[in-house]
Amino acid sequence: MSARGDRFITPRSPVEGLSRRKLSFLPVFAQAVAAMAPAGAMTVIPALVFPTLVFGSTGPNLVVTFGAAMAVVVLVSLCLRPMAKRMAAVSGLYSYTAKGLGQRTAITVGWSAIFGYALVAMASLLVVATYAAQLFANLGVPVAEPRLFMVLVVLAAAAAACFLMVRGIQVSAWFTLLIESSSIAVLAVLMIVYFAVNAPKVSFASVFAWNGNSDSVWIGIVVAVSAFVGFESPTTLGGEAYKPFVSVPRAITWTPIVAGALYLLAATAQDVALHEAPLAVTASSTPLSDLFAQSSPVFAAILDLGIAASWFACAIASVNALVRIFFCMGREGVAPRSVGRTHPVFRTPSTAIMVVMPVVAVVPLAVIISGASPAEGLVNLFMLGSYGYIGAYILASASLPFFLRRIGEATVASWVLGAVTALALTAVLWQAATVSVQAGGTQAFIYGGLLLASAVFALFLHFRRPERLASVGIYDETRESDLFLGKPVP
């Protein structure tokens, strides 16, 4: 509290140590873009939804699947926007939920979001290794030990990502924006050239075909949602953004809409292309690359480079968001206090980064060393990651009207929007989990175990560490210096 006793002003921010009010809109927008990895998702996710590997002989309609995924994600963005306009959060959905549905529910959201970010980051590193190996294959460069090569790529990518994140969010954000912009441009040109060359053989009949298999659509939507997850990651930059109440809401509103339009175009293109492709291509771990390689190995190699670069940017952005939630938990005392430390020079959550990155890297390394199919590994990682994100989205969306009611701004529209979004997401998650369990999948049980563990931990805090539970939901509060010195103190 300040000497004036104003409860809205504090002499020190609870997230002291992070670089405050430095990021302009473009780096904030870059965080959302990189976390979604639109260039990589445009090529990898539709190819994972399509093949017989996941759905048997009757895969879902790609356009319907991605259209449904886009609709539910836009609803989530509409729920998050009002909260982002009123609170400079550093831990995003975790903090919003604490102020809406309470601290115990926030623990579940925080664990779920961390789980989602981590799984997508793991999948991203696996994609980088897979497409780096494919790049050399398309260039005709022999690799004596492909698995060893992929292990080295994962280690190098993880080390490079760690360096960029410790160095600063501004550096990593601009780097990832450059990568994504270049990758999207490259992929767009390659797709245009491919369809121009193959125009006489192109038929759009499959785009509008419906096979009546609704089970595959539910799982397809969950996998397709993984192409959008991360759009909300700018909500973890509320303390570092220059104008958080403007730039953060703008980024989380427009990113899923623009990316969704790109995904629908990519889904249409790949639906056409993959229906005409041989079975060996559609069952491949890198189907689009193999498809391009039939026409031009050089084009395929350029595609591989663009995809690998995009997913490398995604790994950075996902971990950037994850560690800020972890950092806040450390400051609150619900995680080890050490992860709440910041770098004395770069003002980043460096301890959290150094703790998280080895864990993120070890899973793709295990997949590669075990000899498992990269495509199967990616489907499992993306599905698990989507469960984590969707679970966090459900509770964060449901918290909207309660959040607004707490500050006296609740409306009928906010109650309707929160309820509709939460119910829609719950229906998607429930149906996909049911289909997955019936098919023998274990992803739903793993995520269910995480939810149970988070609830048990929240109860432990409630009864044994109530003062720590009460501190959950910290955010970048207004300082006296913000009002009286004319500019924020770093």
Image: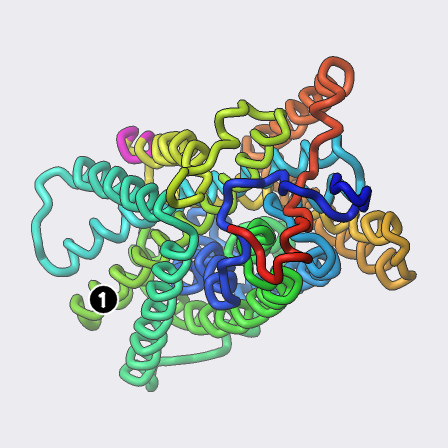
- Three-letter code for the amino acid on which mark 1 is drawn: Ile
Provide the residue designation for mark 1: 302
Answer whether residue 369 is magenta in the image: yes
- Residue 225 can be seen in this image: no
- List x then y, in percent, for residue 32: 51, 59
Q: Residue furthest top?
A: 464
- List x then y, in percent, for residue 58: 51, 56
Q: Determine which quarter of the picture holds residue 181.
A: bottom left
What residue is drawn where x is 12% and y is 60%?
A: 139
Kind of element beneath mark 1: helix
**Magenta residue span:** 366-370
Main SS class of the magenta portion in the image: helix
> In the rendered view, does 130 fall on the left or right side of 225?
left
What residue is drawn where x is 27% and y is 53%?
A: 131
Image position of 251 with respect to 122: above or below: below
Q: How is the image coloured?
A: rainbow
> In the rendered view, does 414 fall on the left or right side of 87?
right
